[in-house]
Amino acid sequence: MFLTVLLSLFTSALICRAAPTLENERCGKPGEKEGATLQGNWNAETYSPGTVATFTCVNGYIREGPIRMACIEGSWLDISRGQCKNIVCYKETVINGIVQYTKETYRDGETVTLTCNEGYQIEHNPEEPRTCTAHGWSPPLKCVSKKCIQPNLPNGYIRDPYRFPISPEAYYNYIYYYCDPGFLSPDRKYYGTTTCTKTGWNPEPKCYKKCAVPTSDSMYAIISYTTRSRIYIEGDKLRFQCYKDHMTSNGQISGEIECLPDGKFFGEKCSKIGQACGEPPVVQFGDITEIKQNSYRSGSSVTYKCANYYKLEGKEFITCRDGEWEKEPVCRGSCVLQQTVMALNNIYYDKSTEIENGLTIQFECMEGMVSENDLRATCGNTQINYPKCSAGRSCPPPKISNAILSPEKQDGYESGSSVDIKCEDIFVLSGHINVKCENGQWDELPQCLKPCTIIPNSLERNHIELLPSESAPDILEHGTELNVKCKANFKRPGSVIASCYDGVMKYPKCFSGGTCRILQSYLDENFLELDESHDNEVFYEEGETVSFKCKTGYRNRNGLTGTCTKSNRQPAEYILTYPYCEEESAV
């Protein structure tokens, strides 16, 4: 009734707008509304009858329904009763992850930090904090299983056409790799296998340098070989026993040598006691500071120095001990990044062009490109293996009903580009307002949720009616709640609210008699869930039958329905019977 009168007055005001306006029929500036601000210019002192004021929400608030007022007979009256509500985000439990919450609720723009358990990674933009928005946490609080990217394999290669990244749950979750000549896998073969697990590739795919095996005569010692094949790779060790009248430089008659990445065994060697040494070892990109001699007495030393732009690793000086020089140092050079090579590989590194020897850096793909392999690379004595990026597959225009795309392209979007999503009027966005194309795949697309209309037959069927003070618009946006009341001689426990959800009005139901309530604890005890046909209704009237279903992994022998019945006790109670589900293995 109120809405009819209000619209009648508003219509009359519009019809009469051309007639002379009495001063007492004009309105001043519209009043303020919580969390809202007026749209347009409102600098005049008074406004004529029929003027409509539209409000929009300020930051930190979200609009629920249109908010409009009209000037009618000197007063501003609501012609639609939308409102601006505080944007609030609540704590969520994250499967396989932990959120560092500091309070119970968060306002618009506030952030939290998400950490995923071992073997899991943050879905969507892991480097960004999770922010409270009008549509919930964005990006979402979600951890997903890690996938294995193509491994970086120095001194080796992957020949077969695998499709990376590979999931640990995939049926074929392993790969074969092959080593360059002179290198072997941990199994001492020219190839190796590795499996994708939640913690990465296991075992780590790697190609080790094969070492030339020394002979006993070259060592002046008896060597204890550990394998019949006498195939050794870096990290392997061999024990030896010096010949008679020989010992190592540190006075031992036995010792151990180790296979190093340069393909040579290193360690103390046996020599005849007091024997002189020949010329000191040659060091690439370095030399000794003294005048070189043909022979050096046991106990004498020489000092090494590297060329410019090279750095000495190891002992600066070495000593001749009983015919053997100590291990010479190495001169390592830094890597200078080549801009032309990076451009050809569609990568860049913007921190420095000179990389210290042994340092691992992370390259980045150029805009719109995706990596073909691991973007990390290590400088090894002036050499670095550049990763490669290539143009990713483009994405077709995202198909979102009732959405407006910006920019809108009919021929698709390049990999790396993004598009803003906005819903048409009266539709409500659910999800991210911006999505990105990555190698032919869009991020999770949002939805434009549909509005609802009130159906009189549905009100009648559920024994409810609108409140006299509630003005129901013809169209309700998704998420709008509408206060209703039970008809005469009907009742319902708790609040009586109808709501719009994606084009479907959800109506509460009122009852003429006693009611039973679904209890979650009883559902859990009996391993039950409510059947979808009941649309999560929690109240049922006397004599009504309720349908259930068993939880996953359980089944029932005797039927999945219950009935709301009245007990014989005084005062009367209403009891709902619950069926029972057993584990499938027990049935």
Image (cartoon, grey):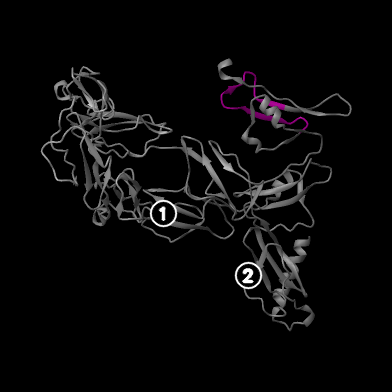
How packed mark 2 is, by other alpha carbons closer than 10 Å (few <14, some 14-19, many 20 or more), is few
- What residue is at 75 percent from the left and 63 percent from the top? 4
Which one is in front, 30 or 197? Answer: 197
What is the quadrant of residue 219 in the picture?
Answer: top left
Judged from this view, the residue extending furthest toward the top is 586
- What residue is at 35 percent from the left and 29 percent from the top? 203
Residue 393 shows up from this direction: no
Q: Earlier in the sequence, mark 2 or mark 1?
A: 2
Which residue was labeled with disc 1? Answer: 397
Q: Indicate which disc residue 496 carries.
A: none
- What residue is at 60 percent from the left and 27 percent from the top? 551
What is the quadrant of residue 178 in the picture?
Answer: top left
Q: Is residue 568 left or right of residue 112?
A: right
Q: Is residue 68 left or right of residue 392?
A: right
- What residue is at 48 percent from the left and 52 percent from the top? 400
Judged from this view, the residue extending furthest toward the right is 570
Name the kind of residue labelled 1 in the image: Pro
Q: Indicate which disc residue 39 carries.
A: 2
| Quadrant placement of the C terminus | top right
